[in-house]
Amino acid sequence: MAKTIRLILGDQLNSRHSWFDEKTENITYLMMEMQQETDYVKHHIQKVVGFFQVMRNFSEEIKEKGHKLIYLRLDDKENQQNLEKNLSMLIKKEGFEHFEYLLPDEYRLDQQLKEICDSLSISSKSYDTEHFLTDRSFLEGFFKGKKTYLMESFYREMRRKYNILMDGKEPLTGKWNYDEANRKKLKDTSVLEPQLLKSRNVSKIVKMIADAGVETIGNIDEENFSWPYSRRESLALVDYFCKNLLPNFGKYQDAMHTDDAFLFHSRLSFSLNTKLISPLEVVEKVEKYWYEHQDDIDIAQVEGFIRQIIGWREYMRGVYWAKMPAYKGMNFFGNRRKLPEFFWTGDTKMNCLKHAIGQSLDHAYAHHIQRLMITGNFALIAGIKPDDVDAWYLGIYIDAIEWVEITNTRGMSQFADGGIVGTKPYAASSNYIDKMSNYCGSCHYSKSKKTGEKACPFNSLYWHFYHRNEDKLAKNPRIGMAYRTLSKMKNKQEILDQAEKYLDNLDSL
């Protein structure tokens, strides 16, 4: 066998990959911390620390299993901070004769590696990451000839294919989806469970990042960093979720509350997106636990969780590979406004945004409804440029990798793709926010007012959004009611004027 170097990227930490079934002196694995990856967008400090931490732990585990490995830390003197430069340097230095890599999940890295392979003087080969339930091209083929990719159809196909919550060819209980049971407001916080936290000191990594001049956003408790850093810790988090959080997950998965950032959410997305654990093993563990505890856990709790993983997560990856690179430039509404400064500070009088952004800065985390219906909803109805929205989401969340970030933000959240992902824009006024949270009760603004002093900005911006985009949305059958209501409003112009005032002063809201 030729002397081979195998690249492992920071989100390819799959210890059960078939690569590791073979041990030979001729294979050397390569992992690198590079400013190419820390600097392409401004990341949350916890995201950079989290990736470096899991990468370092994974590299030690690989070496302990007898594999040869080169690991370049960010501050290594020979680290040239660039994938192509480092690879070329090591191939020349170590005399490698063959290069292999796992298919990246980001388009930019996929293209970069293809270009590198074309320029190398040695042979090369790529392999699947053996993580996802579908390959890159599956979804495009599944929806061939369709303008809209209906997630529910894809989700049902995944349930059938992997026999998840199925009774033969039909779903258990005869229902595929319990979404209507997943929309309860959390009124009693006494039902909350403490999160499983294993803290560690990461001050040395934080210092190294700062010394390298890497610019980051957000906050970090250097002595009590609590994101999982290994497969073992990630699996423990799955077990904890099943025993402590799953019984209430489904009903409260859309709820938001000022007292708790995590509620009943699993916090498994970082472990999944770095591939420490696989979606199928998580789903099978959760399904097995539910089968064993059906008397205590309603099916609506488990179905809602499984839908997020084998439905949305897998579906979003399929959309990404079907539509990139054009997807990254889509701007259906032609939005051009700059992202308000308070997205970087949390300094706003709007209580919902203050909490959703504040916890994002503190924890590098917000759950899907906070991302979709608070920060995303505001950006949508305020007409913020999709490029700005993408950059913010990609940087601030520890689980954000472009394949899953951009389809959720530019697609589902901002409707910038014109309806590929969602059949309608997810625009909402304060009514929805008040229904699903306790944010409005202590807000500077009045949830019931559309105009006048302290009128909630979401109310007038909501109607302004539909008014200014009537030529693009009026024929959408799912939002006809909005236009019928708008046409009958007696104070329509007053509401629009209120919105214009807010749009002219977004940074001061």
Image (cartoon, rainbow, N blue to C red):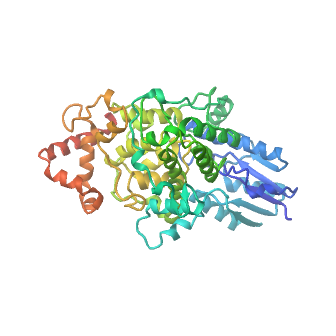
Residue 471 percent across, percent down from the top left: 24, 61
Q: For residue 417, which quarter of the picture? A: bottom left
Q: Is residue 500 left or right of residue 432?
A: left
**In the rendered view, does 194 fall on the left or right side of 504?**
right
Is residue 141 shown above or below 52?
A: below
Q: Identify the image quadrant of the C terminus.
A: top left
Q: How many marks?
A: 0
Q: Residue 58: x and y, percent?
A: 73, 44
One can see residue 84 in this view: yes
- Extreme front residue here? 295
Point 18% across, 43% down: residue: 495
Identify the residue at horizontal 60%, vertical 32% (top origin). 196
Horizontal side of residue 34 vs 505, given as left or right: right
Quick one: which residue is furthest to the right in this view?
25
Q: Is residue 157 above or below residue 493?
A: below
Task: Residue at the far left: name it.
Answer: 490
Which of the 4 image quadrants contains residue 221?
top right
As drawn, is 263 to the left or to the right of 504? right
Q: Residue at x 62, y 44 (%)?
A: 271
Rendering quarter of residue 25: bottom right
In-front residue for pair 13/339:
13
Q: Is residue 319 visible?
A: no
Residue in the foreground of this view, choosing between 370 and 193: 193
Q: Quadrant of the N terminus?
A: bottom right
Q: Residue 371, how many percent across, how many down?
A: 44, 43
Q: Residue 269 appears at what percent x and percent y?
A: 57, 45
